[in-house]
Amino acid sequence: MSKEELKKIYEKALGDPYAPAAREASFTVVGVYTVYIACDVRWGVVGDTIRIYGDVFIDTTGIVGREVIIQRRAPGEVAWVEVGRATTGTMGRWVWDWLLGYGDACIDWEWRAVDSLTGTASGIILVAAAHYTDLSLTSPASAAPGAIVTVSGILRYEDAPAVWVPIGGASIPIYLNGVLKGTAITGPDGSYSLDFTAPTTSGTYTIRAEYAGAEIPAAAALTVAVLGLQVGVPPQLVQYAPHALAAVPVLTVIGVIAYAELTKRR
């Protein structure tokens, strides 16, 4: 029997020889990342600075020095748009201030924050931007007891700096010393007018016109205009009433109009 034949018989009996081998690997147990976002107001008007803030945690510990991406999108949109970044400080808290511009107005924005390292996203909050509105009010400075008093004014919103656009179809309730005298509806040019009967008792009364805004997502401060009306004019002054009317000052108080109202008019 040859040497090769003997080797084959030997290998068959013992099996193929293999040397022992081993390797080591490591892995890391990573905690759960959580990103939070919040805002203390539901809406603002052009020119406001709104603070959006939140936290970044790993498990229950705030992460310091982590960059957070602030994103937003309009309702119905799919893609998120980055609008700013913030860095976490003590206890993982981050803060970002949003200065509302004219291009932001008329949209109820969706907001979220994203951890720049892990891509972990927060939940979604809503913060809307609204236009300023302007409501004027004119009325006679005085009237005879029981006379017909006509009040009028214009409602408009600021679409760009010093560019005012009328708001038509809006309800403007008129009050005399807090008592509703009627509701006027603005025309296409934003103007409104209402007649009511002056009290029969002499005295000075307050006329108030209001505009409640349109579909603001939280309780809105009214747009108001206020004037004084004196009832019981001395007879010798009545003949000068037309001249007095031209000099009546108009007091304007700023208010807001929201996205939903404007889309109805465009």
Image (cartoon, rainbow, N blue to C red):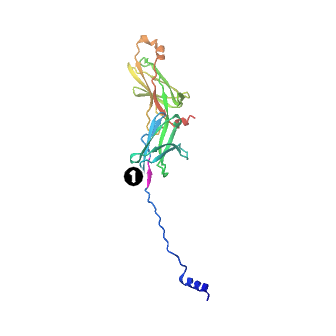
Most distant residue in the front direction: 3
- Residue 224's spot in the image, x, y percent? 44, 28
Residue 205 relative to residue 108: left or right: left
Q: Is residue 87 above or below residue 184?
A: below
- The answer to which image quadrant residue 203 occupies is top left
Q: Looking at numbered disc 1 in the image, what kind of residue is underneath it?
A: Thr
Closer-to-camera residue (3/248): 3
Closer-to-camera residue (88/39): 88
The span shown in magenta is 32-36
Is most of the magenta stretch helix, strand or loop? strand
- Residue 171's spot in the image, x, y percent? 49, 31
Most distant residue in the bottom direction: 1
- Residue 166's spot in the image, x, y percent? 54, 29
Q: Is residue 190 above or below residue 23?
A: above
Q: Residue at x 49, y 24 (%)?
A: 152
Secondary structure beneath disc 1? strand
Q: Is residue 33 magenta?
A: yes
Q: Residue at x 60, y 86 (%)?
A: 3
Closer-to-camera residue (257/52): 52
Closer-to-camera residue (194/136): 136
Q: Which residue is mark 1?
A: 61
- Residue 149's spot in the image, x, y percent? 46, 21
Q: Quadrant of the C terminus?
A: top right
Q: Quadrant of the N terminus?
A: bottom right
Q: Is residue 215 magenta?
A: no
